[in-house]
Image (cartoon, rainbow, N blue to C red):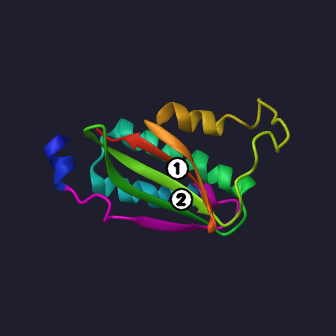
Amino acid sequence: MTAAQLDAAPHREVDHAFPLLHTPGAVSAARRRVRGVLGGWNLPPDAADDVLLVVSELVTNALVHARPPATLRLWRVPLAGRRAVHVEVTDPGPAAPPGSSPAPDPDEHGRGLGIVTALSARCGVRSDPDGTSRWAEVLAG
């Protein structure tokens, strides 16, 4: 995929929102839906894989820690002269204060947000009166 092809595609106006059910199949369902969107965006395979892993980790985090209902959104954005995919999971609850949750067992939990940080050009948390959003931007070419 060339930069011209990425530039030719619409960006922020293509906003995909998926409600997340707090059910055992929610992560795989979100991945399937996002894979379909990414296929239409013609991302390089390695970038699509990174986006899907970020989606998995942010959705899992929401299902474990967030207050339902949560929503997954994604869209394309320019980032440092390149294109990126913005992935965001929002729930109506407040952000947890630092250190408020018990230390997770490192063999089973607790690596997800580290994975998101490693795969993202930028990531963070945004809180407002309507809830909390965890977001990441993954370079897409």
Quadrant of the rendering where the C terminus is positioned: top left
In-front residue for pair 117/20: 117
Farthest-out residue, left: 4
Quick one: label 1 or label 2, which is nearer the N terminus?
2
Which stretch did the figure color magenta?
Answer: 9-27
Q: Residue at x 67, y 49 (%)?
A: 61
Q: Is residue 68 above or below residue 77?
A: below
Rendered image quadrant of residue 3: top left
| Magenta stretch, overall SS | loop
Residue 101 x/y as whole percent: 82, 44
Say which residue label 2 marks: 30
Mark whose residue sits in front, 1 or 2: 1
In-front residue for pair 122/48: 122
Q: Which residue is drawn at 32% across and 64% down?
A: 14
The label on residue 107 is none
Residue 12 x/y as whole percent: 32, 60
Q: Residue at x 61, y 33 (%)?
A: 114
Q: In this view, does 107 lie above or below 73?
A: above
Residue 139 x/y as whole percent: 36, 39
Quadrant of the rendering where the N terminus is positioned: top left
Say which residue label 1 marks: 135
Farthest-out residue, front: 129
In-front residue for pair 98/82: 98
Rendered image quadrant of residue 15: bottom left
Residue 67 x/y as whole percent: 73, 64
Binning the other alpha carbons within 10 Å of mark 1 as few (below 14), some (14 to 19) or many (20 upward) gives many
Amino acid type, mark 2? Ala
Q: What element carries label 2?
A: helix
Q: Is mark 1 on a helix, strand or loop?
A: strand
